[in-house]
Amino acid sequence: MAVIIPTELGTEKISKLLRQYAVPAIIAMTASSLYNMCDSIFIGQGVGSLALAGLALTFPIMNLSAAVGTLVGVGAATLISVLLGQKNYDTANRVLGNSIVLNIITGVIFAAVIIAFLDPILYFFGASENTIAYAREYMFIILLGNVITHLYFGLNAVVRVMGLPKKAMGATIFTVVVNVILDYLFIFVFKWGIRGAAIATVMSQFLAMLYVFSLVSDKSRVIHLQKGIYRLKKKIISQTFSIGLAPFLMNACACIIVIVINKQLYIYGGDMAIGAYGIQNRLAFIAIMIVMGINQGMQPIAGYNYGAQKHDRVSKVLHISILWASVVTTLFFIVTELFPRQMAEIFTDDEELLSHTVRGMRINFVAFAIIGFQMVTTNFFQSIGKVKKAIFLSLSRQAICLLPLLLILPPVMGVDGVWWSLPISDVVASILTLWLLLKQRQEFRRTILDNQTSQIQS
């Protein structure tokens, strides 16, 4: 049986490669973001505005779960792409096996701990007596399927770096379509309320997980499930966690930030302000997921070529990715600034909630155009194994810039202080990102010149 190796990552034209890998990821991530928006629409229209606020309270837990998942999933996928560039296929397979075991262990532990303290955690996150029941009902079911979520997302990332971006896209779109159909049935037909939305999510991810497992079991691929790869290896765990640490910290910080935002919004604006932030999050999710799709397309190309010491190709894929991402975030900025009420009315007809949402949206998204540059560059450093730089950039916007502003501005400006904290931190973080990127470009140029000099001398 012939073994399929994705060598085109090091030879094909960069722009063509990025289209080949990023477009399926963009389609998949856009579909995923539209699902999340539909989920909120179904809950807002089918259950009520308080249920929508309760859903927003679960975001910190979802972010924390995603943080644990990316620690393993993104770390393993990035490591595999670098190993493929180095043609170290045996170790790449062992990384795959270790990632499955680690996803199961971390998924079970995370779910067990959160379920044990779910109510106190939700109250700490800003829940009130009006919203706690909705948040608890939704989150309990999601946590029961936490291992499924981790395995599905982690293995889908591996499928992408195996050279199967369209298959990864198909898995995501399948999940979205099934999820939306089940959402409608469970909420509007069966009248299961917010619990129905959670059941739909877990069921759709379970079916997609089975499909992804079938892809990584294909023995014709150089990377596939086989005997002897599941025993945990200290070096593999260390390298996986090291690479995955940047997205883990980013998501963990996002969890802390959302907690602070929700608490400040509740103090200065009440339950409806929290609901408004939830709507803004769902809308921003569309643009952010498209940029994440670009990042997912860039990651295997950058990782493979960095492993193969082809730094000119690494630089080129970065530049194209930044351009694409900036176009996306700029368009989103224009739409949200021109039509905030129309977009908010998709989710609710509650005038109080609409008022909070429109005001927050105009302020929150004022610097959104530069988000794409910051996201792509952070992901780029992670893709080439520059862990310290990726971690610094992951923390710069949230922990270094945003958190102090959230504590300083609201007591002075009220609820507007929460909204203004977000764009100000985006501007500061982007300046830091540009500084580190310029330094990295200089390093690449020196390496390319050194390689050219060595070739001439030899």
Image (tube, grey):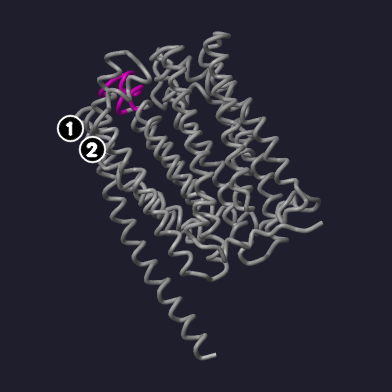
Counting from the top left corner in percent of width and height, residue 251 is at 46, 42
Identity of the residue drawn at 35% across and 51% down: 373
Vertical placement of 303 versus 208: above or below? below
**Callout 1, which amino acid?**
Val
| The one of 163 and 90 positioned closer to us in this rendering | 163
Counting from the top left corner in percent of width and height, residue 305 is at 54, 65
Counting from the top left corner in percent of width and height, residue 357 is at 29, 24
* Residue 275 within the segment the image draws in magenta: yes
Vertical placement of 327 versus 418: above or below? below
Identity of the residue drawn at 48% across and 45% down: 293
Identity of the residue drawn at 36% across and 20% down: 346
Quote the CA–CA distance across marks 1 and 2.
7 Å
Q: Quadrant of residue 199?
A: top right
Secondary structure state at the residue bearing disc 2: helix
- Can the viewer see residue 112 in this picture? no
Q: Is residue 41 left or right of residue 156?
A: left
Secondary structure state at the residue bearing disc 1: helix
Q: Residue 197, which numbered label?
A: none
Range covered by the magenta-colored residues: 264-277
Q: Is residue 26 left or right of residue 332?
A: right
Vertical placement of 188 versus 284: above or below? above
| The one of 312 and 108 positioned closer to us in this rendering | 312
Vertical placement of 448 versus 35: above or below? below
Q: Which residue is mark 2?
A: 408
Q: Which residue is mark 1?
A: 412
**Callout 2, which amino acid?**
Ile
Q: Main secondary structure of the magenta part?
A: helix
Dots 1 and 2: beta carbons under 8 Å? yes
